[in-house]
Amino acid sequence: MSILVAFLLLWGEASQVYETQPSLWAESESLLKPSANVMLTCQARLATPDFQLFKNGVAQESVHLDSPAIKHQFLLTGDTRGRYRCRSGLFTRWSQLSKLLELTGPKSLPPPWLSMTPVSWITPGLNTTAVCRGGLLGVTFLLRREGDHEFLEMPEAQEDVEAAFPVHRAGNYSCSYRTHVAGALSEPSATVIIEELAAPPPPALMHHGESAQVLRPGNKVTLTCVAPLSGVHFQLRRGEKELLVPRSSTSPDRIFFHLNAVALGDGGHYTCRYRLRDNENAWSEDSTPVELILSDETLPAPEFTAEPPGTRVRLWCLSPLEGARFALVREDRGGRRVHRFQSPAGTEALFELHNISVADSANYSCVYVDLKPPFGGSAPSERLELRVDGELVGHQRGRARVRCPSGPPAFASLSLGV
């Protein structure tokens, strides 16, 4: 019985980019009879004399050509059903394997894979494209928007076995393909939702300093801003003011802002945003703020006390100033960093740790800074060591009584000045 060859690319690794990964696709002598004389083409990134085909995880042919080539074709014979990959020579080694290409039975054509580039949303000034990719060379791809009666049809694909469709409207999109005009459509791809946004979504802002997030004047700080797409202009701000600071980049979707010597008064909330190159007014939403707190340790250290009632630990930080900004600092094997912030109206900040678990085990301290010039900051309080093993159920004489999920009871130590 003749076998209809169907093709499915499996995209478990599609979110990553591999510069050495070859491409694999199928070609048939006749799209009217896709099972006739099937060729698998393995295309390398760099010219090489070496190609190898795998079927169902087992190495098949290994070819060494007389001279380097950018691609090689493998003729399939016998039962062609199976999952295929290929790899190409890469200097003295092999490249990584291609994505999977599946050849199946005669019942139906399996779905292609639909993706949006550069992002799955549309906004003024941004050209979004739907890319429909299959595994068979020469088919015709069709894109459909849910609710529309007509397909947007593209001419047959070439060696990249994919077609690109411009997207101008929000909606739920899927794509299919057919091997010839009278042929049945393949199963549709998974649906991709395209949103229409008034402004691009926010980037992510992260802090990488050379010391703890409680900074001293003169410390160096690097703030990294990452956008959801490449090739944009970035801006760093503190409040509503743009900061013109040194910057660098290692990839087109991110930038590093360098604060080479922070000073008192440089504390506060930092945000970043980006705009599309073709639209100078279309700034994205602001990132979630990153707060930097600076202390010159000229103000008296705060008092730091704790009480662990039940599954909650209360930590009080008391300063001689009203209206100060308080920071709870956590120190563990991962380093020393600000855990939480508070700005109470009075002189005392209350930090609560709920549902205490082993993950809360660390050394804790607190500091405060004056939000008014000259922006002085305190020395750190005494440290409190919290050790937890199991579920917190009570406390006695500075120790938090806990019960292990299995085994004997254990304790959480709450010792000041450790």
Image (spheres, helix red, strand yellow):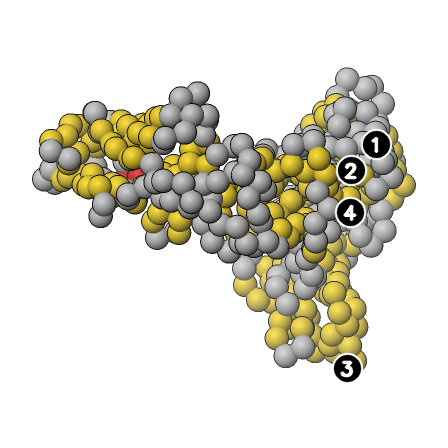
Residue under label 4? 231
First-in-chain label (1 vs 3): 3
- Front residue of 23/210: it is 210
Which tag is nearer the camera, tag 4 or tag 2?
A: 2
Instruction: Return the x and y of residue 234 as percentages of the image width and height.
Output: 73, 43
Which tag is nearer the camera, tag 1 or tag 3?
A: 1
At label 3, the amino acid type is: Asp
Q: CA distance from mark 1 to mark 3?
A: 57 Å
First-in-chain label (3 vs 2): 3
Q: CA distance from mark 1 to mark 4?
A: 16 Å
First-in-chain label (1 vs 2): 2
Q: In the image, is residue 253 above or below residue 192?
A: below
Q: Secondary structure at mark 4?
A: loop
For image coordinates 85% across by 47% down, the residue present is: 157
Q: CA distance from mark 3 to mark 4?
A: 42 Å
Question: Are dots 1 and 2 in contact, CB under 8 Å?
Answer: yes
Residue under label 3? 66
First-in-chain label (4 vs 2): 4
At label 2, the amino acid type is: Arg
Residue under label 1? 281
Which tag is nearer the camera, tag 1 or tag 4?
A: 1
| Circle 3 crowding by C-alpha within 10 Å: few under 14, some 14–19, many from 20 | few
Instruction: Return the x and y of residue 170 as percentages of the image width and height.
Output: 77, 24
Which label sits on residue 275? 2
